[in-house]
Image (tube, rainbow, N blue to C red):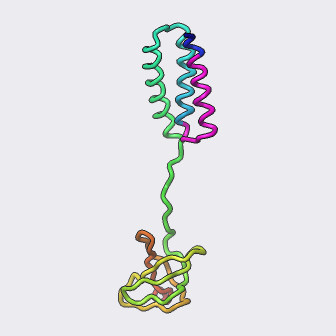
Amino acid sequence: MNYPLFWAILGAVFCLMELFLPTGFVESTLGLSAFVVAFMALGVPSFSAQIVVWVALSLVFIFLLRRFVPQRTPYSLQESTEARTLTAIAPGQTGRVIYEGNSWQARCDDETITIGADQPVVVVRRKGNTLYVIPESALRA
């Protein structure tokens, strides 16, 4: 078997797979490692040694490339953003607010305040799918 040709084809397949199945450049690092091993295979005929070098190079390339791949950060609410109540929010109960164009479940952060419908509120935090709000008038007072 022609090992350099095998590694070159394997490298090309991995690089093409990266185009169709984006995996954060993992497949392209496997392909790049296969191309390096294809050149190495011209002088080293041992297939098991080629596999060991390919695995080692792949791991090294993946760890080196990780610093260049942007990390995804989870969506977080901006501090003190405005919303408007759709329904009244009784003390200790949930209601609905419109925030960033979407309807959210909401609770009043102060368990003693009732917030009427169609009132401006300020989002102070989020827990799961529930926004905790306080009336805008409470901030002015």
- Examine the image and state in which quarter residue 110 appears: bottom left
Name the residue at 36% across, 86% down.
92
Q: Is residue 110 left or right of residue 62?
A: left
| Coordinates of residue 55 in the picture (x, y in percent) | 45, 25
Q: Residue at x 51, y 52 (%)?
A: 72
Residue positioned most to the front: 1
Report the number of discs: 0
Residue 17 lies in the magenta stretch: yes
The residue located at (49%, 71%) in the rendering is 79
Which residue corresponds to the image point at 56% horizontal and 79% vertical from the top-left?
Answer: 98
**Coordinates of residue 71 in the picture (x, y in percent):** 50, 49
Q: Over which residues does the magenta segment extend? A: 6-25
Q: Eyeballing the image, is 124 above or below 65?
A: below
Q: Position of residue 86 (x, y in %)?
A: 54, 85
Q: Is residue 106 left or right of residue 12?
A: left
For the residue pair 79 and 85, the one nearer the viewer reads as: 85
Main SS, magenta residues: helix
Q: Is residue 22 magenta?
A: yes
> Which quadrant would the N terminus be assigned to in this image?
top right
The residue lying toward the viewer, choosing from 6 and 113, is 6
Task: Specify whether 113 is left or right of 137.
Answer: left
